[in-house]
Image (cartoon, grey):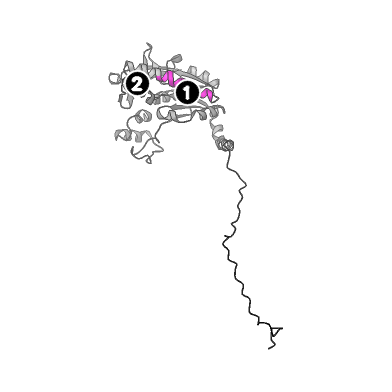
Amino acid sequence: NPNPNPNPKALPLKPLHLHPLKSSIPPLLPIIASTTSPPTPAQTRVDILSESLPFIQRFRGKTIVVKYGGAALQCNVLSDLVLFSCVALRHVLVHGSGPEINAWLLRTGHESKFHNGLRVTDAHTMEVVELVLDGKINKSLVDEINILGGTSVGLCGKDARLLTARPSSESAVLGFVGEVARVDPSVLHSILADGHIPVIASVAADEAAQGYNVNTDITAWKLAAAVGAEKLILLKDVAGILEDRNDPRSLVKEIDIARIRRMMEEGKVAGGMIPKVS
């Protein structure tokens, strides 16, 4: 074989073995440039409204009664009511405020007492209930709705004979706790027709103008029936009716009257939930 080396005096050629280069510099990672930025608050609102459009069309011109009170007063739902009132949904807001009444009673040296989920109301308690609900809370809600861009009218059951009360069947125990005997929604029709949100405190009076503390949930139900509401929404600081009161995961999402009665008999529905399911 001929010598592959053309220069015999040179060192013999050796095969060249190539090895991958080693470096302390890590390989470059692919650069991923996002072409979309996080949605702005304005875009988020647009997306929500787009998803809401079928429901807005479905409920346009309909009346929805919302019961709003207790711990739920801490939730920012008034802006939602103002928004939907702008797209021709009509709302009636009914409110109480048990925690606020409790606090004011304590300030005056009185403790709150309850019987079957209803507040025991003597003359002093009735005075505090009326001052807190019709005076303080009602006007605060009206102010907040107006600040948010809506227009609202504050009322209690006494105004325009909206609610006429009668003594509770357990008045011997409950005192000035009333039942809603009659509803005259005439004043609400004109307020709603003008695009305002009526804000109603759950205080009523009988034919002799005696004031009564009426349960907010039952008041909302009676008003919803009287105005022909499409929906009644009760806002509360618990998930809803629970199969096991100690387990918030046991939410009952759908129920009929027969099962409600069984749960009440079994004691699964108690306290403030009793007037709600009633």
Check disc 1 and report its element: helix, strand or loop.
Answer: helix
Predominant secondary structure in magenta? helix
Q: Quadrant of the N terminus?
A: bottom right
Q: Quadrant of the C terminus?
A: top left
**Residue type of the residue flagged with mark 2:** Arg
Q: Where is residue 255 drawn, in percent x and y?
A: 39, 36
Q: Which residue is mark 1?
A: 141
Q: Is residue 251 above or below residue 114?
A: below
Magenta stretch?
132-147
Q: Is residue 120 above or below residue 30?
A: above
| Residue positioned most to the front | 9
**Residue type of the residue flagged with mark 1:** Leu
Left or right, 84 with reference to 175: right
- Between 133 and 91, the residue placed more toward the observer is 133
Sequence-wise, which precedes: disc 1 or disc 2? 2
Q: Residue at x 29, y 33 (%)?
A: 265
Q: Is residue 187 above or below residue 229?
A: above
Q: Which residue is mark 2?
A: 107
Distance Cα–Cα, label 1 vs label 2: 23 Å
- Between 13 and 166, the residue placed more toward the observer is 13
Q: Is residue 203 visible?
A: no
- Between 94 and 28, the residue placed more toward the observer is 28
